């Protein structure tokens, strides 16, 4: 049941639907119920619903064709929020990643000692070095998803694995199911491939499964991009039953499902369920060492069946030839010691999360958020739709932060922003203090001006 805002009935209903659209709770391109059906469900007159629909249609939130249903849109159409040039402030909260652990220097020396045995080879292997592929496969198997080395392709980060998947499996104009909010670089890659994005709301509590099932049935997406483990940016950890239900809907639609496990190792309070690919279906699981170990170690992977892996390798020939051998040797060393590395990383992240939570409680008690059970960020709901204006004001004070629309589309998610807790506690305290100062002087909704805030990681 929709909770309707205050004011004349038709205007209240229009305002409520508009707010749900802008917060990403009503997916773009979703079909609206008939006026009579919605009026009956809400206990309103049909004239009230007609007035609301007409108001939203005039504002650009509803599109219709003669003789067909109406659907949700936004004024100006769906487009990416501005990315702009790299202009970091003194404190940079765009990047959810940690400095390298101390052990990296030791492991790099061990990798360098291994290098001579590979020097008499050409160094080009689009699938990756066999020892690294075996180590990645063993990690999947230990987590409950039996995997052979032949099912692994090594990439230069998880984003390249996703890009190769797009190149291999997606044609321009095909529908792709994505979460909203979602990882900006993945959305940008899909837009660059001219995919038609179809969104499913996700919150700190998980996916809107009814919306996911409806979108899968209605749009029959060629591809779905999901992040079930400490989702970026909400931090949601999807339970096993929801994963199973989502996979059933997507399998029925014939969808290839990309499962992004970038943050899966960073559990803080609750361990993730077994890998989502264990539920069956046509899946491509991508991951990397960037978040769990170090962003400077540009090694990622894709896990899929043998046919799909070789399609990704074929697509790679148009991008690069292979990943660097020395970095792959280092990654192999890291994976062999990962069970020693991860507990220390988790403890560091817990301390920084606690520092951010204390700072928010002290400086910004009106902001709403759910402390995540893992990952590296909080998805904060602001008291008003001021995210873009707030980030511009913060940048003027030396703090770079990513506004909510970068995680969806221009005009959406203005009541949200992502705050990583990847900096030390004293820097997080300063950052939140700056945010509080900026918020106190940002009293009006964003006007549409978009900050030049660079990339998001």
Image: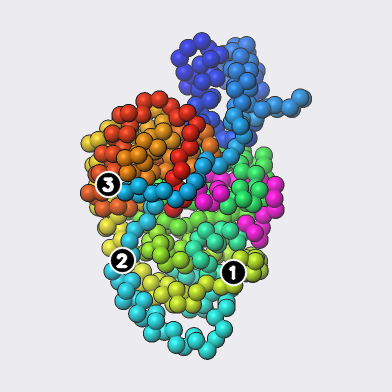
Percent of width and height locating residue 307: 65, 67
Can you tell which mark lies on residue 101? 2
| 165 left or right, relative to 234 | right
Q: In front here: 422 or 3?
A: 422
Kindly state the secondary structure of the residue where label 3 is placed: helix
Tell whether position 182 is magenta.
yes
Q: CA distance from mark 1 to mark 2?
A: 29 Å
Say which label, 1 or 3, has the lower sequence index.
1
- What residue is pinned by disc 3? 428
Q: Earlier in the sequence, mark 1 or mark 2?
A: 2
Residue under circle 1? 320
Badge 2 crowding class, 10 Å Cα cut-off, few under 14, some 14 to 19, many 20 or more, is: some
What residue is rendered at 37% in x and 32% in y? 382
Magenta-highlighted residues: 166-188
Side (left or right) of 360 relative to 295: left
Q: Secondary structure at mark 1?
A: loop
């Amino acid at each position: 049941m929709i909770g309707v805002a205050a004011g004349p009935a038709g205007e209240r209903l229009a305002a409520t639907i508009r707010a749900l659209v802008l917060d990403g709770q009503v997916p773009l391109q979703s079909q609206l119920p008939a006026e009579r059906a919605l009026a009956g469900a809400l206990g309103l007159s049909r004239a009230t619903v007609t007035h609301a629909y007409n108001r939203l249609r005039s504002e650009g939130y509803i599109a219709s064709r003669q003789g067909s249903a109406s659907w949700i849109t936004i004024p100006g159409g769906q487009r990416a929020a501005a990315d702009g040039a790299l202009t970091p402030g003194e404190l940079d909260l765009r990047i959810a990643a940690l400095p390298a652990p101390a052990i990296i220097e030791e492991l790099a020396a061990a990798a360098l000692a291994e290098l001579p045995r590979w020097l008499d080879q050409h160094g080009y292997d689009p699938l990756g070095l066999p020892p690294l592929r075996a180590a990645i496969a063993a990690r999947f198997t230990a987590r409950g998803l039996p995997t052979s080395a032949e099912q692994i392709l090594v990439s230069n980060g998880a984003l390249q694995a996703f890009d190769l998947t797009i190149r291999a499996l997606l044609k321009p104009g095909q529908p792709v199911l994505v979460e909203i909010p979602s990882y900006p670089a993945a959305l940008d890659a899909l837009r660059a491939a001219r995919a038609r994005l179809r969104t499913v709301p996700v919150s700190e509590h998980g996916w809107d499964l009814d919306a996911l099932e409806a979108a899968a049935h209605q749009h029959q997406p060629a591809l779905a991009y999901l992040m079930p483990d400490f989702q970026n940016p909400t931090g949601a950890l999807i339970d096993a039953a929801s994963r199973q239900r989502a996979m059933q809907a997507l399998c029925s639609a014939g969808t290839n499902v990309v499962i992004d496990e970038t943050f899966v190792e960073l559990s803080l309070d609750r361990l993730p369920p077994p890998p989502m690919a264990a539920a069956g279906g046509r899946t491509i699981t991508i991951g990397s060492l960037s978040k769990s170990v170090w962003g400077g170690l540009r090694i990622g992977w894709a896990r899929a069946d043998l046919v799909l892996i070789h399609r990704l390798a074929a697509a790679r020939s148009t991008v690069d030839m292979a990943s660097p051998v020395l970095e792959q040797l280092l990654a192999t060393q890291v994976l062999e010691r990962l069970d020693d590395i991860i507990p220390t990383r988790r403890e560091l992240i817990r301390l920084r999360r606690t520092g951010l939570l204390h700072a928010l409680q002290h400086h910004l008690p009106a902001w709403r958020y759910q402390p995540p059970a893992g990952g590296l960020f909080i998805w904060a709901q602001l008291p008003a739709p001021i995210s873009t204006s707030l980030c511009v004001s913060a940048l003027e004070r030396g703090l770079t932060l990513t506004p909510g629309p970068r995680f969806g589309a221009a005009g959406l998610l203005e009541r949200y922003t992502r705050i990583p807790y990847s900096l030390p506690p004293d820097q997080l305290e300063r950052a939140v203090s700056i945010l509080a100062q900026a918020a106190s002087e940002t009293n009006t909704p964003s006007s549409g001006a978009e900050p030049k805030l660079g990339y998001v990681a």
